[in-house]
């Protein structure tokens, strides 16, 4: 019994340490994509021995932080209505998804440096499946073009969202105008050839 | 005189070594973005001492290889006619620029891991200026939208080109169809709201 309690305590301690490390990694890498393992350990209040007991490399810590950010992102996207008019559904997705990309952009920079492109795609499988369904819905309704593949259109949406994050970092776009820019661009990109590009309410201004 | 000749010989040797290292880096990183400095030195046929005499870090080698790839790219783009009908000029730019991105994509992956986003932008200043002029021309002619900034449209074009490189790497797009996909997407993205998306000759097929 004593030993069972002791191992349960150890497990609880381990979970607490892992949670503290992932939380600290999200914050540290969010501020500086170059943050080292020692900085993350310090911010988590754990020693190097504890850090290396749970994560054998910086890549593993970045992977865990990115996985958690995407899990939380999926929870947010679960609340977005992606049914009805495909143009409005796409706008709603971009409005919510954009904020997630914006919040996670330093973390994503760290992930792009540390993880393979394949692993980053794998981590994004949840959001990607959502956009795939949204694009398929728009194609079926005739609102989106069908001369390009669904997969290509999903990649264009993600590329434009990430491009907005880069433009903000470069000081050429402000966060509050990002969703409008992405929406205006992607809706035009998805318009079937021969059909007028929809004029979205409000416009984006030059 | 003897000493002058000797220093001229040393300079010539140094230039030859640097050229061999940059050439080897372009090839090694092109095949594997993770290629180490020792692998690059071995491929260049230089020792570690020579390598470190000219480049103090892997980042410097990646930077030099990327700079050279972009210089060569600029030479290719110099031969592309970017005047006349903006849609055709954009198609020609994409056709040529896409091949450069395709050839350099493993090198770009290495650059994204090793260099800052600011430095990568700086290196791309030449191609970026070209696209800026092309976009400005299309806007002035009424062929491209003016409700989004020139800078944003340039970043969208580059994002979609790089996205095609990623899609090829993921096995979801073939190289021979990339230019058509990029052109069809970007021309639609650049179409002024309220105007029909141009149907490009040939089409891209689903």
Image (cartoon, coloured by chain):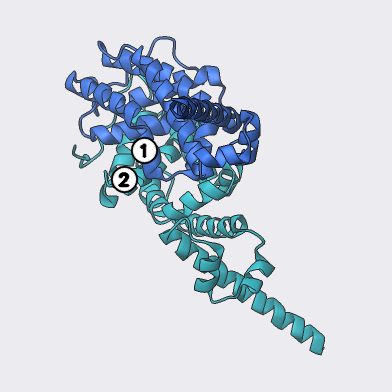
Chain colours: A blue, B cyan
**Residue indicated by mark 2:** B170
Tell me the SS state at disc 1: helix
Identify the residue under disc 1. A121
Return the mark for residue B90.
none
Quarter location, residue A143: top left
* Residue A118: % across, % down: 36, 43
Choose between A30 and A132: the one closer to the eye.
A30
Q: Residue at x 58, y 31 (%)?
A: A169
B71 vs A47, nearest the viewer: A47
Residue at the spot 36% in from the left edge and 20% down from the top edge: B193
Identified at 21% across, 39% down, the residue is B203
How would you rate the neighbour count of disc 2 (Cα within 10 Å): few for under 14, some for 14-19, many for 20 or more? Answer: few
Q: Is residue B139 visible?
A: no
* SS state under label 2: loop
Instruction: Report x, y in % for residue A128.
Output: 32, 29
Compared to B120, does A148 lie above or below? above
Query: For the residues marked 2 and 1, what is the alpha-carbon distance in whole angstroms?
Result: 9 Å
Residue at coordinates 52% horizontally, 24% vertically from top-left? A103
């Amino acid at each position: 019994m004593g030993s069972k309690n002791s191992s349960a305590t150890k497990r609880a301690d381990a979970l607490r340490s892992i949670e503290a490390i992932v939380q600290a990694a999200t914050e540290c890498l969010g501020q500086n994509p170059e943050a080292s393992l020692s900085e993350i350990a310090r911010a988590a209040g754990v020693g190097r021995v504890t850090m290396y007991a749970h994560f054998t490399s910086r890549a593993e810590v970045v992977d865990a932080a990115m996985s958690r950010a995407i899990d939380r992102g999926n929870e947010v996207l679960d609340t977005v209505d992606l049914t009805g008019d495909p143009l409005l559904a796409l706008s709603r997705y971009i409005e919510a998804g954009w904020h997630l990309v914006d919040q996670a952009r330093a973390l994503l920079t760290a992930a792009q440096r540390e993880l393979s492109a394949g692993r980053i795609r794998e981590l994004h499988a949840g959001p990607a499946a959502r956009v795939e369904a949204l694009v398929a819905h728009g194609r079926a309704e005739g609102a989106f073009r069908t001369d390009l593949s669904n997969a290509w259109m999903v990649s264009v949406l993600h590329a434009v969202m990430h491009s907005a994050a880069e433009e903000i970092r470069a000081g050429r776009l402000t966060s509050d105008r990002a969703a409008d820019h992405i929406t205006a661009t992607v809706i035009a990109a998805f318009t079937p050839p021969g059909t007028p590009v929809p004029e979205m309410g409000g416009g984006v201004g030059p």
